[in-house]
Amino acid sequence: QIQLAESGGGLVEAGGSLRLSCAASGDGLSVNYMGWARRAPGKQREVVAMINNGMTVYDDSVKGRFTISRNNANDALDLQMNDLKPEDTGVYYCNRRNRYGRNYWGQGTQVTVSS
């Protein structure tokens, strides 16, 4: 059973930075796809950054401000968020897949950006 645990959320002023991390455990994790998604208040969850077959892809709303990276030593997935804006507020979820393509999600971590 794959389990994901996010950490690093919190309250920050606009223009500040946060670094999220996702620890993964369990057998059969795929290294081909991993990502971060965000559910803003009143909106559906949407992927903001992903690593897909070695390529990084970002939503336009975070391009140039967020950086997704994988720690090869411990298979953690990080999201460095700079120049945060109030519209970045939401619950951030780590997304990993197993070798068969089944999706797994963490519990989420709250990010709140004050204006």
Image (cartoon, rainbow, N blue to C red):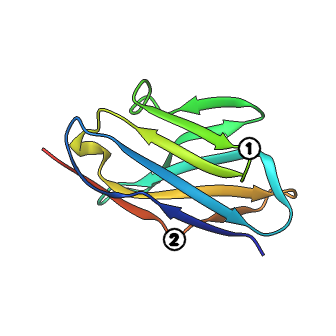
Q: Secondary structure at mark 2?
A: loop
Q: Earlier in the sequence, mark 2 or mark 1?
A: 1
At which x and y percent is residue 24? 68, 62
Query: In the displayed structure, does residue 68 sit left or right of residue 17?
Result: right
Q: Nearer the viewer, residue 31 or 72?
A: 72
What residue do we see at 85% from left, 67% from top?
Answer: 27
State whether residue 48 is above or below residue 42: above
What residue do we see at 19% from left, 40% from top?
Answer: 14
Q: Label 1 sits on what residue type?
A: Asn
Report the quarter where the N terminus lies. bottom right
At which x and y percent is residue 89? 29, 51
What residue do we see at 50% from left, 43% from top?
Answer: 79
Q: What residue is pinned by disc 1? A: 72
Q: What residue is pinned by disc 2? A: 107
Q: Nearer the viewer, residue 45 or 99?
A: 99
Residue that sits furthest to the left in the current view: 115
Q: Quadrant of residue 64?
A: top left
Q: Quadrant of residue 87?
A: top left
